[in-house]
Amino acid sequence: MLIALFPGDGIGPEIVAQAKRVLDALAIPGLTYEDGLVGGAAYKAVGHPLPPETLETAKRADAILFGAVGDPDCDSLERHLRPEQAILGLRKELGLFSNLRPAKVFPELAHESALKPEVAGSIDLLIVRETNGDVYFGEKGFRTTADGLREGYDIMSYNEAEVRRIAHAGFQAARARRGKLCSVDKANVLETSQLWRDVVIEVSADYPDVALTHMYVDNAAMQLVRNPGQFDVIVTGNLFGDILSDQASMCVGSIGMLASATLNGSGQGLYEPIHGSAPDIAGQGKANPLATILSAAMMLRYSLNLPEQADRIETAVAKALANGARSPDLGGTMNTVEMGDAVLAVL
């Protein structure tokens, strides 16, 4: 079993190092690693955010453990050379279309949420976000209008096959949880969303045991604050999913706690925390590694078929928090390595 380690930029190397320590502690037979450069680090080293050798490693790997990309030094580069193109390129080249972002409040952290503790405590949901289409991959550019004004455009589009496969992913996830799926769209104004809703309804015929509801994205954003406990699984497009999953992260108390998985049809996946590269704290030991450690647990469960080891990591994280482990984002003073130590101590 080969894991590609792509730490990337900012705090990426610090948090990936802690996740690897946890994986090593499990002593999983046959588990091997290969490192690769991505993002701004790759651009500075070889002139491209996703070098060919990194992509080749990714294609051979059973799973990718990814840190983060994003470097202010690269903000003025042409778009195709910016660090973020690494993650978009991996999604495209590996066909990674199904992004899973769980959001669940640890009881000890309910008071860290911007919501009332009794509201935050009800959060236990999974967002299934399509990640290989929508405005991120549609035709885009700049042009000049007939009256001489500069105009930017990004085309939102989905075909029915793209919607169908992510709908199946959503229904299957709901079937494995509490049997409720909410499809989020904007069908009242967008033709793309109308197709989305039509296809999701068609796919629902294959899952009579899953209760399907629909919600417009603006209402979904409000409901995540008002009554997040109503949601089990949310399935939505790339743009809406990007926004709602970040909102969900703050509802649970800290963006430093949320893991994610992005899978293709064969079960190969890219696993990463959702918090980004945080260049303002890079190298200071302030980063919370728990989201990356939890991403490693998702990797064991979804791509390597090692659910018992995944459970061990998740239980260890919960116990570390129950024992008082807190990084600065959680109101504590423990540094990145100390947070890793706290998980290892109970693993």
Image (cartoon, helix red, strand yellow):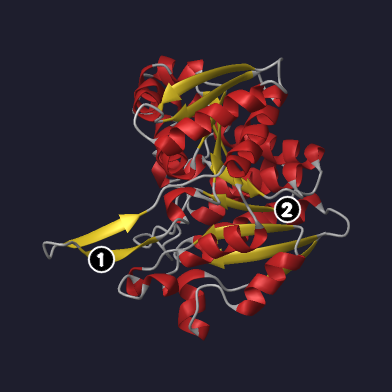
Q: Amino acid at mark 1?
A: Arg
Given residues 104 and 128, the one toward you in this image is 128
Taking the image as shown, residue 17 lies to the left or right of residue 88, namely right
Taking the image as shown, residue 180 lies to the left or right of residue 218, namely right
Q: Marks 1 and 2, Cα distance to the nearest angstrom?
A: 39 Å
Residue reaching furthest right? Answer: 29
Residue 99 appears in the figure = no
Residue reaching furthest left? Answer: 147
Could you tell me which secondary element the residue under label 1 belongs to? strand
Taking the image as shown, residue 282 lies to the left or right of residue 91, namely left
Q: Looking at the picture, how far across and down is residue 214, in whole percent?
A: 49, 21
Seen at 56% across and 43% down, the residue is 259
Specify the quadrant that holds the C terminus: top right
Report which residue position mark 1 lands on.
143
Could you tell me which secondary element the residue under label 2 belongs to? loop
Q: Quadrant of residue 282?
A: bottom left
Q: Amino acid at mark 2?
A: Gln
